[in-house]
Image (cartoon, rainbow, N blue to C red):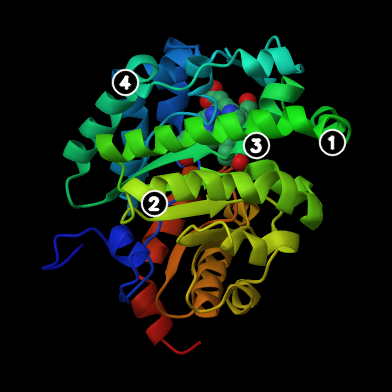
Amino acid sequence: MTGANDTPYLLRAARGEILDRPPVWMMRQAGRYMKVYRDLRDKYPSFRERSENPDLAIEISLQPWRAFQPDGVIMFSDILTPLPGMGIPFDIVESKGPVIDPPIRTQEQVDNLRPLNPEESLPFIKTILQTLRQEVGNQSTVLGFVGSPWTLAAYAIEGKSSKNYAIIKSMAFSQPQILHKFLSKIADAIAVYVRYQIDCGAQVVQLFDSWAGQLSPQDYETFALPYQQQVVRQVKETHPDTPLILYISGSAGVLERMGQSGVDIVSVDWTVDMAEARRRLGREMKVQGNIDPGVLFGSQDFIKARILDTVRKAGRGGHILNLGHGVLVGTPEDNVRCFFETAKQVDQLLAVPV
Ligand code: CP3
């Protein structure tokens, strides 16, 4: 539904065009809430295989595309995927999540990390992104993504998902020089990886700094923001026209600071009212979001009402409709379909007085 214009909707909105409705996609739109994904997971139980075997990763990325025709097709991968190429192996263990063993705790380990060479360690990414571009043509926009340094460091140092981030914070507040060195090395590697994704076909790239919302604003300015900026600056030097999105979970306390990262679009979670987010970020900053993923457990009328409310609050232009975080396991697929169908009719629905 791109009309006479060959550029897909999401890319046009990301570049600042005013459209008749916001483009729509969902974080974590490929994954366990879909039966076709669970069936494939039963056959291929290893997450690393599902995400690093191009045939499987392409198939999984296209599952939500075939089912719901979102305006964005995000490659199936993980924020941890580039770490082995730097010398940090990981695994994703069912019902436990990511595991990094041994975790990074010492200066020596940081010194021994390798710079990332994506052609060598991530060749499958090229096949995945190139094929996705061919498959969706100009009907949708292909998104790449990366983890931002603070969040990747959190996994590498904690060794797994954490509730309170005690280990990385203890390093931050007692041996900051080790952490800064590590964050800077990750930032350089991630910048190289973003450029590679763009060269392979990613049209928009989202940076996930999911756990940066765990930092106080003052520590965000020390440990998260400078390394987001380091990534963005390096990418913009060579690829100034590719829109970049930044997402943080629980970002209400640092929203204005997210705008200082240099990205084009701030992905807002649901703890912030969308109208307030727009006021706080200024009309120049584009926004994405921000419906609570839990809303998809409500009735379809409720889902529709929340979509209309969010689109009204975001106002015309500069808005990509999305959830405020990833779609949750157990979400009814029919409700995901309702979300996408409503989003695509939003211009007609908003024209009808309520
Ligand atoms: O959006 C998409 O459809 C692309 C898929 C995607 C995955 N991971 C696949 C995945 C994306 C965008 C990610 C990013 C990611 N990975 C983030 C940032 C987004 C966020 O949620 O804040 C983070 C923090 C990770 C680290 C990670 N990997 C976690 C927390 C988990 C879940 C652990 C669990 O078991 O609940 C993973 C594993 C993972 N990555 C799964 C998927 C679909 C689930 C494992 C599986 O399907 O077997």
| Element marked by disc 1 | loop
Mark 1, residue position = 164
Q: Which mark is first along the chain, 2 or 3?
A: 3
**Mark 1, mark 4: which one is toward the viewer?**
4
Amino acid type, residue under disc 2 in the picture:
Lys
Amino acid type, residue under disc 4 in the picture:
Glu
What residue sits 30% from the left and 59% below the top?
11
Mark 2, residue position = 236
What residue sits 39% from the left and 21% below the top?
117
The quarter of the rendered structure image containing the N terminus is bottom left
Q: CA distance from mark 3 to mark 1?
A: 13 Å
Q: Is residue 301 above or below residue 283?
A: above
| In-image side of 280 versus 316 (left or right) | right
What residue sits 37% from the left and 23% below the top?
118
Neighbour class for label 1 at 10 Å: few (<14), some, many (≥20)?
few
| In-image side of 147 versus 57 (left or right) | right
Q: Which mark is first along the chain, 2 or 4?
A: 4
